[in-house]
Image (spheres, grey):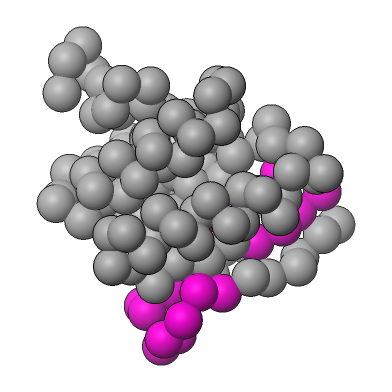
Amino acid sequence: MIDGRITKNFSLWEMMNKEADESTKLVLTPENTEFAQMMQELRDWYGKPMEPSSWYRTSAFNKKVGGDSKSAHLDGRACDINNIPQNLYKDFTIAWQVICSIHGKIGGVNYYDWGMHFTDYEDKFGNTKFVIREKRK
């Protein structure tokens, strides 16, 4: 980690949610650090900046925004990216599936009108294979 960077293009500041009212107490673990590296691999594949809008969430902030009470955001293992064009959702899904497979993770994506949600922790919810959810609104 150099100058607050977890990876070449993502900083600890980007991982912590800037909209939460309370202090963020993100504890870096091997799992969420690997997830950050996986997000870096996705960014490298894309070749353009990606803008995280929500990564790690505290329990209080997650509840405030209507997140699942077991959300992977609570572990720092989910990331929402706003600036992905909808016409590239399928390409991003394939790239994320490949990255998850390489890392031996059961990942998933959610599609929204505002962007995409990525996780490498679908097994937390009992899933045994990659999950794609349409949640556009």
Asked whether residue 120 appears in the rendered view, the answer is: no
Is 110 displayed left or right of 24 in the figure?
Answer: right
Count of number-bearing discs: 0
Quadrant where the C terminus sits is bottom right
Residue at image location 33% in from the left, 67% down from the top: 105
Instruction: Pick whichever, 64 or 45, lies toward us.
Output: 45
Asked whether residue 115 appears in the rendered view, the answer is: yes
Residue 68 position in % (x across, y down): 53, 70
Residue at image location 49% in from the left, 47% down from the top: 79
Residue at image location 63% in from the left, 70% down from the top: 132
- Image quadrant assignment for residue 8: top left
What are the residue bounds of the magenta stretch? 110-131
Q: Residue lying at the far top in this picture: please name it.
A: 3
Instruction: Pick whichever, 108 or 22, lies toward us.
Output: 108
- Image quadrant assignment for residue 93: bottom right
Q: Assess whether residue 68 is covered by the magenta stretch.
A: no
Instruction: Pick whichever, 74 or 36, lies toward us.
Output: 36
Instruction: Pick whichever, 66 or 49, lies toward us.
Output: 49
Residue at image location 65% in from the left, 61% down from the top: 110
Q: Assess whether residue 129 is covered by the magenta stretch.
A: yes
Is the residue 16 above or below the residue 59 in the image? above
Quadrant where the N terminus sits is top left
Residue 120 position in % (x across, y down): 39, 62
Residue 2 position in % (x across, y down): 17, 15
Residue 100 position in % (x across, y down): 39, 60
